[in-house]
Amino acid sequence: GAGVSQTPSNKVTEKGKYVELRCDPISGHTALYWYRQSLGQGPEFLIYFQGTGAADDSGLPNDRFFAVRPEGSVSTLKIQRTERGDSAVYLCASSSGLAGDVQFFGPGTRLTVL
Amino acid sequence: GDSVTQMEGPVTLSEEAFLTINCTYTATGYPSLFWYVQYPGEGLQLLLKATKADDKGSNKGFEATYRKETTSFHLEKGSVQVSDSAVYFCALSGSTGANSKLTFGKGITLSVRP
């Protein structure tokens, strides 16, 4: 594929609702990462997939956050019972999976929880 | 754990001025180091990288040298242009095993005046 794509680009929801954010990585990239970027901060790691499995989910803030990558390509980040503090830009990145390899980022999904 | 510290911003320079953006890191093992840039309205993109001590990364007139003795990766450019106005993030990865998750600094906003 041309690059990492993310949908939707913007999502506005109400407190307590459930949301799903989608990431389509570069074709052939086995590694996929989710990050969260709050205003004025650098991106913070959430979860890392190598293939279909979550190799490191240590960055997920609590059990309201969950992500899947069932076929080793597209990934979905799921947030239950959203809170206002979840408002941020959610970034997805993919890479070849080799240590230190370059990660290519998508444009992000801006989530606003009212 | 791993951490990245960037100098406080924002930074405003006149065109053709010399630029230095400081970055220091804390990590176990031997991380790879990166500078990412976010231009207005665009996603994060890699500017340059260095994977081992004394390596120099360079791109678009920007340079940064991996200094293990001072745990630093300062970004420099001899003559900035208005088009360099952006947010710059220092990051590291790969300090432990094959997980290449990125740890970012807070970022610094650079504005270049004509």
Image (cartoon, rainbow, N blue to C red):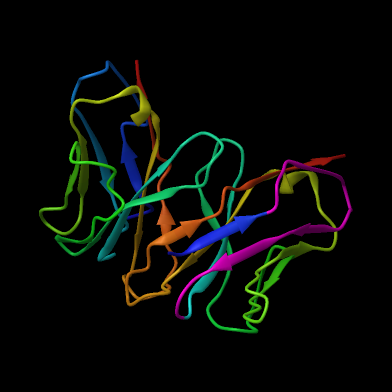
Residue drawn at x 42%, y 57% as measured from the top left: A104
Quick check: is B108 in the magenta stretch? Answer: no
Asked if A66 appears above or below B26 in the picture, the reply is above
Asked if B59 appears above or below A87 in the picture, the reply is below
The outermost residue toward the front is: B1
Quadrant assignment, res A99: bottom left
Magenta-colored span: B7-29
Residue drawn at x 43%, y 42% as measured from the top left: A107
Quick check: is B15 in the magenta stretch? Answer: yes
Residue drawn at x 46%, y 47% as measured from the top left: A43
Percent coordinates x, y for residue B34 in the rendering: 55, 65
Q: Which corner quadrant holds the N terminus of chain B? A: bottom left
Residue drawn at x 31%, y 31% as measured from the top left: A8
Q: Which corner quadrant holds the C terminus of chain B? A: top right
Q: In this view, does A88 lie to the left or right of B40?
A: left
Percent coordinates x, y for residue A73 in the rendering: 20, 56
Percent coordinates x, y for residue A85 in the rendering: 37, 28
The outermost residue toward the left is: A70
Asked if B5 appears above or below B11 in the picture, the reply is below
